[in-house]
Each structure stands twice: as C-alpha cells, then as structure tokens.
Amino acid sequence: MPTSPPYLPPLDQLVALGDPTEIGEDWPDYPAMGIAAEHVPELIRMARDRDMLKADAETPEGWAGLHAWRALGQLRAPSAAVPLLRLMVREADEDNDWAMEEIPVVLGMIGPPALEPLQEMLPLLAREDEWSVTAAVGSALVKVAKHFPDTRDAVVAALARQLESARQQDATTNAFLVSNLLSLSAVEAAAVMEAAFAGEEVDEAVVGDWEDVQISLGLRTERSTPRRRIDFGLPKDFLGRQPPRSAPKPPTKTKQQRKAEKAARKRNRKKR
C-alpha cells in the first residue's frame, strides 16, 4: 500500500486515471483538469514517487507517475527537467519501458531548459556503456531540437562530439548516436559518422552500414556493394543453416541483442 503523503485535488484525478492504453493513444488534456503551474512541485513528487512506481500495474496508482510526467510535459515545466532526467536514468535499471519511451518525449516538450542537463548527462552515460539509457538521452535531445528548431545546431554538435569518442564507447551506443544524427538529417556530421564506421565502431544491426547512412543523408542514391549479413552473435552453424540434429539449441539471446534487433526492426519499419 502507498505510504507517501496523499495527493490533493486536482492531482488526485491523476491517481484515478489508470492504464493509459485504456484511455487511448492521445494524452489527456491535463490542464483542462485544473492542473496548472502551481502544481508542478507536487507533480514532480508524484512522478518520482517510489510507492506509485512500484504499485501493481493492475491498479490506478501504478500509472499515476506516468500521468504526472505527461502533465509536466504539457505544462512545459522547466524545473521538472533535471528530476525527470534523473528519474529516467534510475528507471532504466528497472527496465521501465514506459519511462524510457515517454520521458524523452516530455523532455522534448519542456525544451531548452532540458538541453543543458541532457548534454551533461550524455557523455557520463556513454562512457559507462549504458547504451540503452544513452539512447534515451539522445532521443530526448532530438525531440528538443524538433520542438525547438533554434536548438538543432547545439544538439547536432553535442551528438557529433560524443560520436568522436566512438573508439572508447560501446558499438551499440555509437549506433544510436548515428541514428539520432540521422533523425536530424545532420549532413554536417557525416565525416564523424564515416570515421566511426571506418573504425568498425558502429553496430550495424541497429543502424545499417555506412552506405545505408549515406543514402539516408541523401549523399548517395543507391548502394554500390552488397549488404553484409548481420551476425547477432550466434554460432556460425545457426546463421542461415539448419543445425545438425545432434547440435545443442542456439543460446538464448542476451537482453542487449534483443533490444538491438528490436531497434533495427523499428528503423526498418520507418523506411517502408
């Protein structure tokens, strides 16, 4: 049972809203519920409320934090940028997919106040090979740039600067940095991307190879070489061939491999 102090009206409405998938794809209009700038401190408390975050997803309380961070996004609350970024990093360890997907959206809505903390967090996570949450930070930066075009150059510079350290970073981290740059059509960062591919420091399972990237950037119209088969780390006997009857079952794919494949499929869907 929740032990945190109760939330007073109008925030008690968020505790009762429940599963967002039952509400619909569109976010509710939280300001229309009477939620305003004066409620930002309590919204931040609700978004970070561990009792709420750990509550059973079958109960409305389990979704209150999500509604709180959505409301903060609609209010474009500057003071929420750092707490929500820290929440996203924390929830990455809990495999909270909702937080990893939606908090970048919220930070993008908040905009410029989120830019500096995101820029500061990016190298810290990249150096630690925390590629999944690094990807979320990169996604948040892209969303800031798209909501606020005046920030685009600063975002591209931050992403490109991080990719310059490709040799010291995980290949999957580098792939998501490339993907972020592609989302902003960052032709000006082509040389940095090419260098990362030349050093074989980019996970092609996520973003494709250098020719794919050039096509995405409009630097070429078609491939000049066949695309290489992507090896997801399985033994050669299981790459496109039927294993012998006596062979053991393929090893279970790691969480990192599953996420990389999911990201690749998602990117491929966007190309269709």
Image (cartoon, grey):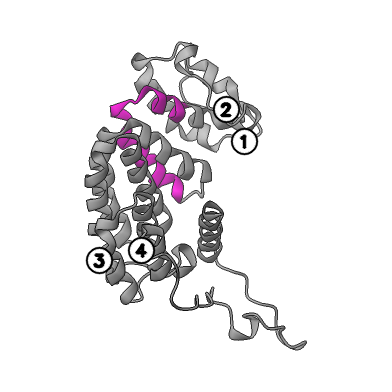
> Between 33 and 201, which is closer to the camera in this rendering?
201
Q: Quadrant of residue 159?
A: bottom left
Could you say where residue 156 lies in the image, as x and y percent from the top left? 26, 51
Q: Taking 124 as reference, is 70 left or right?
A: right
Tell me which numbered mark, 4 or 1, is placed earlier along the sequence.
1
Q: Are marks 4 and 1 in contact (CB under 8 Å)?
A: no
Residue that badge 3 annotates:
191
Residue 61: give its label.
2
Main SS, magenta region, reads helix
Q: Are marks 3 and 2 in contact (CB under 8 Å)?
A: no
Residue 174: give its label.
4
* Amino acid under disc 1: Asp
What secondary structure is found at the residue carrying circle 3?
A: helix
Magenta highlight on residue 163: no
Camera-near label (1 vs 3) is 3
| Residue 1 visible in this rendered orientation of the protein | no
Tell me which numbered mark, 4 or 3, is placed earlier along the sequence.
4
Report the magenta residues as a range: 68-92
Q: Are marks 1 and 2 in contact (CB under 8 Å)?
A: yes
> Between 8 and 191, which is closer to the camera in this rendering?
191
Count of numbered labels shown in the rendering: 4
What secondary structure is found at the residue carrying circle 2?
A: helix
Residue 56: give its label.
1
